[in-house]
Image (cartoon, rainbow, N blue to C red):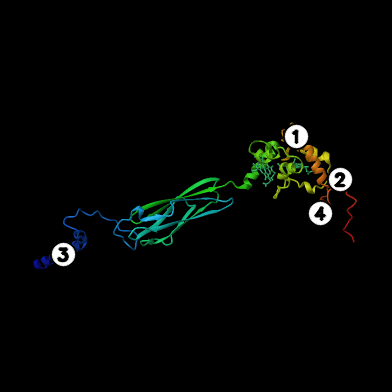
Amino acid sequence: MQAKNTRGRLAALMVFSFLSLAVNSPARADGPQPPPVPPVPPPSTAPVAPATPAPADSLAWDAVMKDMDAKPGQMSADFFFSVTNVSTSDVVIDHVQTSCGCTVAKLPSQPWVLKPQDNGKINVTVDLHGKPVGTLFKTVTVFFTNQTTKPLTVKVTIPDNPENARMRNQQMALGDRQKVFKDDCAKCHAEPTHGKTGKDLYAAACGICHDAEHRATMVPNLHALNHSTDRIYWKQWITTGKVGTAMPAFSTEQGGPLSTEQIDSLADYLDTTIPHNPAPAPTAQLHPKVDAAPAPVAVPPQVIK
Ligand code: HEC
Ligand code: HEC
């Protein structure tokens, strides 16, 4: 009983001292009485456990901030950050964290082990759906060896959607048809008319709306009107426009930018270039209410052969 107990204690003591020797021996190798080693938290997922902590500068980044001007209607912005392990030990990028659900950062693998001199990319995608006009910043935090973190930033500038801007302009013009000659609008709708007459004036003052490549539906095509025209008609429309529509009054008396001479030059130009009677274009024939002008006799009925 006694003997067995002693042997048992002895065995336990031997196992214990073997263990403590095994645990302490690497520290002892350097010299006598090292200060107590603080407990190192076990690396959570890392398959490799580097002996040295990875300081923040063990990784070299191509940039810590990247920016992009989104195009109108662009729905996502893609970035990548290139990173190189410039230290002499392995660095483990454990995971990345983003500042909002709209931003996704992808590692080549997780965890991602970078051997010395290894390099690779972290892809970052920002979802732009519903993002307001302006500049947005998103942060991606990279967590690597020994709980070191590195923040990366992406900056996206979202332009005003041109369709929105156009709608706003149309609304403003419908509220005040002379608005086009005021404030910022004047830069495109009034200033280009200064000092011009005739054809050039037409392009600057009228063509901007009436001959636009994607003409708004509210703006009629002056080259395909379904009624007759004459010089008085043109002069009248240019001078006074039409209340309650986006057709402005161009005469200076009514707040427009054009002198009487300029308006006369326009009326002359339009009266000589646009046929007085509508061309027999199919669109003109389709409208039943064309009767402002007497139907031109030159058009033979083509229906019955
Ligand atoms: C940068 C030049 C520019 C400025 C500034 C500008 N416009 Fe225009 N506007 C245009 C052009 C070009 C068109 C022809 C349609 C197009 O291409 O968008 C147009 C067309 C229009 C039309 C015809 C309807 C349409 O959408 O085509 C209206 C009405 C109008 N503008 C009102 C305004 C008002 C009001 C402002 C100021 C709040 C303004 N615009 C400022 C260039 C400009
Ligand atoms: C800001 C855009 C804008 C500009 C600039 C503009 N117009 Fe207009 N115009 C309109 C709109 C919108 C209408 C349709 C009005 C309506 O609803 O009846 C119109 C209608 C007209 C009409 C009537 C067409 C018809 O249906 O009989 C004439 C004529 C006309 N414009 C001539 C001109 C001339 C000439 C100029 C240049 C001096 C000019 N417009 C400049 C927007 C514009």
**Tags 4 and 1 touching, CB below 8 Å:** no
Kindly identify which residue carries mark 1. Answer: 259
Where residue 189 appears, x then y in whole percent?
A: 68, 40
The quadrant of the image that shows the C terminus is: bottom right
**Tags 2 and 1 touching, CB below 8 Å:** no
Quick check: 22 left or right of 80?
A: left
Kindly identify which residue carries mark 4. Answer: 282
From mark 2 to mark 1, how far is it between C-alphas? 30 Å
Task: Name the amino acid, label 1.
Answer: Ser
| Dot placed on the residue nearer the N-terminal end, 3 or 4 | 3
From mark 3 to mark 1, how far is it between C-alphas? 112 Å
Tell which of 48 and 101 is nearer to you: 48
Q: Residue at x 20, y 63 (%)?
A: 22
From mark 4 to mark 1, how far is it between C-alphas? 37 Å
Kindly identify which residue carries mark 3. Answer: 12
Residue 247: mark in rendering: none
Image quadrant of ligand 1 equals top right
Of circles 3 and 1, the one toward us is 1
Where residue 56 appears, x then y in whole percent?
A: 35, 53
Kindly identify which residue carries mark 2. Answer: 293
Q: Secondary structure at mark 1?
A: loop
Look at the picture and state if 292 lies above or below 144: above
Task: Name the amino acid, label 3.
Answer: Ala
| Dot placed on the residue nearer the N-terminal end, 2 or 3 | 3
Q: Does ligand 2 reach within 8 Å of label 2's beta carbon?
A: no
Where residue 158 appears, x then y in whole percent?
A: 55, 48
Task: Name the amino acid, label 2.
Answer: Ala
| Dot placed on the residue nearer the N-terminal end, 2 or 1 | 1
From mark 2 to mark 4, how far is it between C-alphas? 16 Å
Tell which of 25 and 198 is nearer to you: 198
